[in-house]
Amino acid sequence: NRISTPKILSEKPIQSFKLLGKFNYRNDTTFAKVPSSYSFKNIYVQKVVLDSFIKMTNAAEKEGVSFKIVSGTRNFDEQKRIWERKWKRNNTSDSVSNALQILKYSSMPSTSRHHWGTDIDLNNLNNSYFDKGKGLKEYNWLVNNAHKFGFFQPYTSKKSGRTGYNEEKWHWSFKPLSSHYLNVYNDSISYKDITGFVGSAVAKDIDVIKKYVKGIEY
């Protein structure tokens, strides 16, 4: 039941500006707007991701479980607004501590998997929601079935020694694409590419590429 890697991976090399989120995904022909019945707002993801998500959520609904996308693709500018808002809110003169606080759940611009259009946030942005009742049923369904449609949870418990972001039970990634994007990112992006936002100077000090981008296997 697993989804095979799309042929597009070998046909179209990924350009660096896409890895860094520096493009308008709304005008990109490989992206599609998520229908309102499957989302809470105007959200875009890669077309192959959307197709697989619709298949997954339709299967879930047959078992009394519903999913909607809370967040999908975010480009550099959108991630920058999130990052700089949190940076200002923290109101500390210690840049490293400030960045580490934000990095518990939010990525530095140019390091987010949400730039790629391969990752989605589902139903709720709080781990506690998925610990009981309706949320627990939804999470258990994903754990047992999401892989059949190509999706996996990148930020699981850190008890296994995984580095980087805290656990995010809502965040699911389309592995046939995201694993390829991650490999290309690791081969082509360096700290000179992570710039253009408040706090970017500490990216290398924190080793954000190794500990956060490469903190998972795929």
Image (spheres, rainbow, N blue to C red):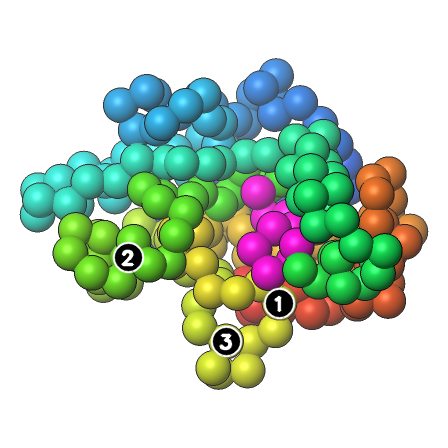
Quadrant position of the C terminus in the picture:
bottom right
**Callout 2 environment at 10 Å: few (<14), some (14 to 19), or many (20+)?**
many
| Image position, residue 159 (x, y; %) | 47, 82
Q: Which residue is mark 3?
A: 158
| Image position, residue 67 (x, y; %) | 26, 40
Q: Which residue is mark 1?
A: 164
Q: Secondary structure at mark 1?
A: loop
| Image position, residue 86 (x, y; %) | 67, 44
Q: Is residue 185 above or below residue 29?
A: below
Task: Identify the main secondary structure in magenta.
Answer: loop
Quadrant position of the N terminus in the picture:
bottom left
Residue 107, magenta (yes or no)? yes
List the single residue furthest toward the left. Answer: 63
**From this viewpoint, is residue 70 visible?**
yes
Q: Is residue 155 left or right of residue 36?
A: right
| Image position, residue 72 (x, y; %) | 48, 36
Disc 1 and disc 3: Cα gap in Å?
A: 8 Å
Q: Please, what is the three-letter code of the amino acid marked with disc 3?
A: Lys
Q: Is residue 210 left or right of residue 104?
A: right
Number of the front mark, 2 or 1 = 2
Q: Which residues are magenta?
A: 102-114
Residue, x 28% and y 57% (percent of image)? Answer: 130
Asked whether disc 1 touches disc 3, contact meaning CB atoms under 8 Å apart, the reply is no
Q: Which residue is mark 2?
A: 130
**From this viewpoint, is residue 209 visible?**
no
Q: Please, what is the three-letter code of the amino acid marked with disc 2?
A: Phe
Mark 3 or mark 2, which has the lower sequence index? 2
Q: Please, what is the three-letter code of the amino acid marked with disc 1?
A: Gly
Disc 2 and disc 1: Cα gap in Å?
A: 21 Å
Number of the front mark, 3 or 2 = 2
Disc 3 and disc 2: Cα gap in Å?
A: 17 Å
